[in-house]
Image: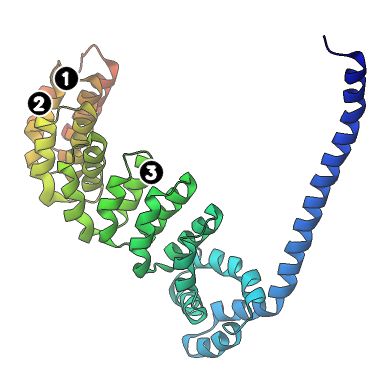
Amino acid sequence: MIHLGFVTQALLFLPGLGLVLSLLITGTRLVRTYRQGRRRRLAAPVRAVLLELLCAPEDEQSELLDRIAPADKRTWKALEPTVAAMLGKVSGRARTALVLLYERRGSPADAVARLRSRSAARRGRAAQVLGRLRHRPATESLCRLLDDRDREVRLTAARALAHIGDPVAVPHLLESLHGKRTVPPAVVTAALTSLGPDAVPRVAAGLGDPAPLVRAVAIEVLGVTGAITRTPDIVRALWEGPETEVRIRAARALGRLGMPDGLEPLLAGLRPGQPVTLRTVAAGALGNLGAVAATGPLKEVLGDADPHVAGAAAATVRRVTG
């Protein structure tokens, strides 16, 4: 049984504990406000020059860079978050000027070094800056962060690699789809899609991966990027793939590519007995091919028991015949 005196002491202690916590929270806010104000004061003289730099013609940029780049470490630390934010928003001459500013400060090399920091926040921040700078020499280091112990760092690294656009990152991005530390498929797909046509051969290599998710994402990317030369590989995945999700992605990709080679496998995917989702996707994909030969099989499923299949078939018939 709990002693009554102990309960009384605990109840008397609680208000004091609440007061201490309140003081700690207030103190933390005051310190944060003070630091933010100090950063603003430190950066204020240089921030005006930075705004001039963003608007200056090319022949005036060098002089303005000479005024900003020599800033001491404390001033640059206060200014750099503003520079990083602007780097993600501007383009053209203004963006080039900001990249030159980072290079004069030696910041890309510093950011690469910070990728090995013990602090997840610093690793993520460094990855973000390198991505915005499109600093290609950092590709290999960023690829290693795809296996980082912190999930947000992994996501930031993947997005940074997308900005940099180096095809070398493809196998690392595909590999990050499975294992103990993964990157979500949507993030990997977006990153791979951003890498451009030079990445297509490496993405296509993912079609032979033993992991179904890797094959599915590779197929999705090939469809989105219009890799028509890979149509036979995607057809094979739809015909022979044992996993439904892989076959669904293949059907969707064939619709996006719009090649005649996709007609027969899509019609096969439409037939009764196939998974409902595959039949629905195949019906929609046939509309992108615009093949009149598909109207007969599509009309046969207009009265299908599944409303999704019937609806997709009806919409495709209207597109093809209308």
Give the alpha-carbon distance from disc 1 to disc 2, as whole Å: 8 Å
- Disc 1 marks which amino acid? Gln
Q: Which mark is residue 274?
A: 1
Which residue is denoted by mark 2 in the rendering? 268
Residue at the image point whose x is 20% and y is 18% from the top: 302
Which residue is denoted by mark 3 in the rendering? 183
Q: Which of 116/82 is in front?
A: 116
Q: Which of 202/229 is in front?
A: 202
User: Is residue 287 visible in the rendered structure shown here?
Assistant: no
Mark 1 crowd level (few <14, some 14–19, many ≥20, 10 Å Cα): few
User: Is residue 223 visible in the rendered structure shown here?
Assistant: yes
Mark 3 crowd level (few <14, some 14–19, many ≥20, 10 Å Cα): many
Give the alpha-carbon distance from disc 2 to disc 3, as whole Å: 33 Å
Mark 2 crowd level (few <14, some 14–19, many ≥20, 10 Å Cα): some
Q: Quadrant of residue 180?
A: top left
Dot 3 falls on a residue whose secondary structure is loop
> x, y (%) of residue 65?
54, 85
Sequence-first disc among 1 and 3:
3
- Disc 2 marks which amino acid? Ala
On screen, residue 199 versus residue 98, left or right, reads left
Q: Is residue 161 above or below residue 137?
A: above
Quadrant for the N terminus, please.
Answer: top right
Residue at the image point whose x is 35% and y is 69% from the top: 137
Q: Is residue 17 above or below residue 176?
A: above
On screen, residue 86 versus residue 45, left or right, reads left
